Image (cartoon, helix red, strand yellow):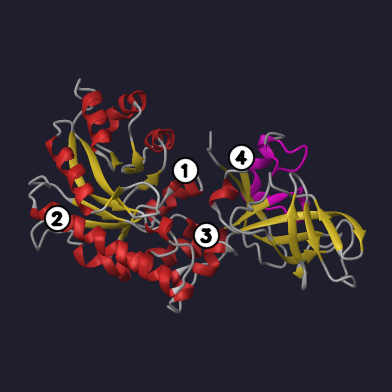
Amino acid sequence: MEQYKAAPLGFSSADVTDLPRSRPLLRDFPTPIVTLSESAVAHNLATMADWCREAGVGIAPHGKTTMNQDLWRRQLDAGAWGITVATPWQASVALGWGIPRVLLANALVQPSALRALAADADRLTVWADSTRAVDIMTEVLSGGAAAGPLDVLVELGGAGGRTGARGVAAALAVATAVAASPSLRLAGVAGYEGALAHDASPESLARVSAYLEELVALHDAIEAAGLYPPDGPVILTAGGSAYFDQVADALAPRRDLDGIRGRRVDVLLRSGAYITHDDGFYRSITPLRRTGSGKEFRAAIHGWATVVSRPEPGLLLVDAGKRDLPYDEGLPVPQAIRPFGSAVAVLLHGAVTTALNDQHAFVRVPEDAVVAVGDVIRFGLSHPCTTFDKWRALAVVDDALAPEPHVIELLETTFG
């Protein structure tokens, strides 16, 4: 199994298949390695499902975080409406895996991709933030490539944000074009607040709230203009993993699954990082910690690397770098050390990662720290989305924080 850097050297396909039974100790696996903690994943799935139920919202988690069929299925089994993706290729993977409802959180304006995905138009919903995008979709699909109208959400953006029509008036023009297209169905309103803020300061939270108010105003304007189709539900969706509490506060009052107030409306979060959480960015900003709800996610991803050099008393070099560990939202955090020959990791105090090379991390420690070449350090990681894509397979352990973690399977990823 040399194609998997997470597998021990000399491991065979039979050895991988036997992992749920053999349950070897993590110490017998090579470093660098990233592990996924099963106990934390199960906890996070249940915690998010409970939170959504109590908040009165649904969820279509962003699948780009993990790109793993088994985890997607577990999210669906926990009550997810469907799976969100970011690119036409990811949409094709999701549809190929039989995901019943796929939300492509982007404009689909590549003619070849449109034609290829049109056969599954009954399971696919896409976004549009310009009349140009609507014109392209209408022209490509006018030849009958789709079995039926393609559902389209009008995307509202914000000044300084990412994609999305700027302002209700511009977005309403897009909605008007979608409603007039014979190939498309106006299916609701979408947005992403995470591009407008990056911390939990009062200013950032106020900016997010103002944007969400505008998102609701767009939905109301579309309804008032009579642009929504007379039958079928519509969707209001926003919500990454940093501000989903504010999304629920703003949008949940519009949810009406049975159409008691008139039109059937669903409200969907698209948070994806919750399934693994982290020890960095999301730990610092997650609403569950910020609002003191009494519930918290648990970090399920960790990096493990061996000390290969201590060339100076206060400097360690370990065998994991940019090709193994994420670094775009903060450097890995040394948490614990497993001394050479031991299966048990103990807390490591006073250590900090200062830099990453391709295959090495620089870790500064107190000069009197009891750390030696051959010891293994466990790192807390920041940003799961740029962790999974570095690994074709992650080692799943029963509990990464247990005294002696056991490997119970290898989880394959699909990133192309």
What amino acid does circle 1 point to? Answer: Gln
CA distance for labels 3 and 4: 19 Å
Q: Position of residue 117 (x, y in %)?
A: 32, 29
Q: Residue at x 72, y 55 (%)?
A: 304
The residue at which mark 1 appears reads as 69
Residue 408 at x, y percent in the picture: 63, 52
Secondary element under disc 2, as helix, strand or loop, is helix
Q: CA distance from mark 2 to mark 4?
A: 46 Å
Residues rendered magenta in the picture: 4-33
Q: CA distance from mark 3 to mark 2?
A: 40 Å
Of badges 2 and 4, nearer the viewer stands: 2
The label on residue 221 is: 2
Q: Sequence order check: which comes first, mark 3 or mark 2?
A: 3
Q: Rounded to the nearest whole Å, what is the CA distance between mark 1 and mark 2?
A: 38 Å
Between the C-alphas of marks 3 and 1, the distance is: 15 Å
Give the mark nearest the N terminus, 3 or 1: 3
Please say if 258 is above or below 62.
below
Query: Which of pointers 2 and 4 lies earlier in the amino acid sequence?
Result: 2
| 3D distance between C-alphas at marks 1 and 4 | 13 Å
Is 356 situated left or right of 19 in this image? right
What amino acid is labelled 4 in the image?
Arg
* Residue at screen point 20% across, 55% down: 218
Does the residue at mark 3 contact the one at mark 1 (Cβ under 8 Å)?
A: no
Q: Who is closer to the viewer here, 355 or 52?
A: 355
Give the SS element for disc 1.
Answer: helix
**Numbered mark located on residue 41 in the image:** 3
Using the rendered view, name the quadrant where residue 183 is placed.
Answer: top left
Query: How far across and how far down the image is residue 327, in percent?
Result: 64, 53
- Residue 35 seen by the camera: yes
Q: Is residue 52 visible?
A: no
Left or right: residue 298 compared with residue 54: right
